[in-house]
Image (tube, rainbow, N blue to C red):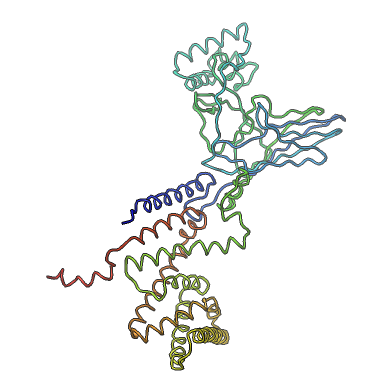
Amino acid sequence: MTSKVPFYLGVILLIIAGLALSIMRHTDYGVPWTPGETRQIWDIEARIEFRAQDAPVKVSLASPSTQSGFTLISESASSPGYGVSYLDSESGHRTEWSIRHASGPQILYYKAQFLVDDYATVSTTTPEPNLIQKPIITGPHYTAAEALLQQATARSADNITLTRELLKQLNDNDNQNAALLLDDKSKVRVASELLSHAGVVNRYVGVLQLEDGRRRQPLNRMLQVWDGKNWQLFDVNNTNPVHNQNLLIWDESNVSLLDVVGGKNSRVYFSMIAEEIAPQQATLKKADADNLLNFSIHSLPIAEQSMFKTIMLIPIGALIVVFLRVIIGLKTSGTFMPVLIAVAFFQTQLLAGILGFLLIVGTGLIIRSYLSRLNLLLVARISAVIISVILIISLFTVVAFNIGLNEGLTITYFPMIILSWTIERMSILWEEEGGKEVFVQGGGSLLTAVLVYLAMTNPYIQHLTFNFIGLQLVILACILLLGTYTGYRVTELRRFTPLSDD
């Protein structure tokens, strides 16, 4: 006897591969599990204004990148006459404009598009503690700094709690040491210098508060502190780490937001707008941003996508047919003819499709019964049935149009060859088994087609099959498992009813 261990191992591998591909589509590309969801995209524009001094100009702007909660989809610059480059350096990602000669007021635009992405992750490199540049603090400022750090250190256990205690003191209006240090410096700079003086890795960053429709908004300076594994963001006006989903870190260079050489009176403002898009659009945008080969139907032209949207539902119909025939024991005329009829119901709608199916098959059986008396060869008989089906469909379509029944026009979507073979099989079955068996198999085929149609028109099933190709492997594994079933069908259990009564 052949061992079935390789078979079951293959089925398990199919299920694991299918689920893994589906989970990857959800986590890496953000495809939702349920239909009707939308994804949010932020279009953010930086407007740079300065006055050129009749000389060569070079402008460098700190630019954002993919970060926790946000995936950078695209970036572009509008700068007539300027050369534009996107640079990655030790201080982070920057956009640089350059021109040989410019004079007078200048306006440059930088635009970034971010997808709100809960699964966006960035590999964090552990900063080197020896790179901390301790500030030079002298005189009474040194005494004040030592007093603040001494008190905060005594009340803290790690870098995060130390930061929290320092910010409490800096926000205390009655603290004379804090007032002295804040006399000529901003709060975020004082906090950064105190932490650096204590040997804590930190940096101040430019953060953008995302709010739909905001214009000419400046960056907010905040503090990031290294906790040993990740960067924690602090608003220096509060004491606890910030966990606001609408905060986008724009500048993490810890150097400067904007550098202008050859110009003066420079400033930068930010405007933003939110947009809701379909998951398919978000998937395409994220795949393009990652520069990866996205094995997705969404990468095909729209016409082909529409075709595959129906094709990817056929395995669901096949699974239902296998379950009904193998487990339930339902008889159908042909193995997968109900699936093709269900596909035709997509175009005709259910009620019109059922009526059309009954009219075509019923009329075809009458014509086929006449042809059987002529003792024609099989090929000629089938060809005659095909022509008869075409004539029947044409006649019903013309009649439906003339009486104003528009639903009847969709009857042309029925597969003519399949219907012809169905009529031929039912006719032979009538001659060999009788009319009862014809109604049993015909009714079973129609019932199966209706069930397949209801499953294939379910929005959740349509969404999953179209967006998660890996589920096709799971369906294949289920069909293979059903193929190993050799027990009783549900419809056969009625034979044992008398035994249970005894």
299 relative to 142, above or below? below
* Residue at the limit of the structure toward the left, as seen here: 502
* Residue 471 in the figure: left or right of residue 307: left
| Residue 5 in picture, x, y percent from top left | 35, 51
* Residue at the limit of the structure toward the top, as seen here: 139
Q: Nearer the viewer, residue 218 or 429?
A: 429
* x 48%, y 50%: residue: 22
| Residue 313 in picture, x, y percent from top left | 48, 63
| Residue 215 in picture, x, y percent from top left | 67, 41
* x 61%, y 57%: residue: 300
| Residue 110 in picture, x, y percent from top left | 71, 39
Which corner quadrant holds the C terminus? bottom left
Q: Nearer the viewer, residue 358 or 261?
A: 358
228 relative to 315, above or below? above
Residue 103 in sight in this render: no
* x 52%, y 54%: residue: 467
To which quarter of the image does residue 65 belong? top right
To which quarter of the image does residue 99 belong? top right
Q: How many marks?
A: 0
Residue 258 in sight in this render: yes
153 relative to 410, above or below? above
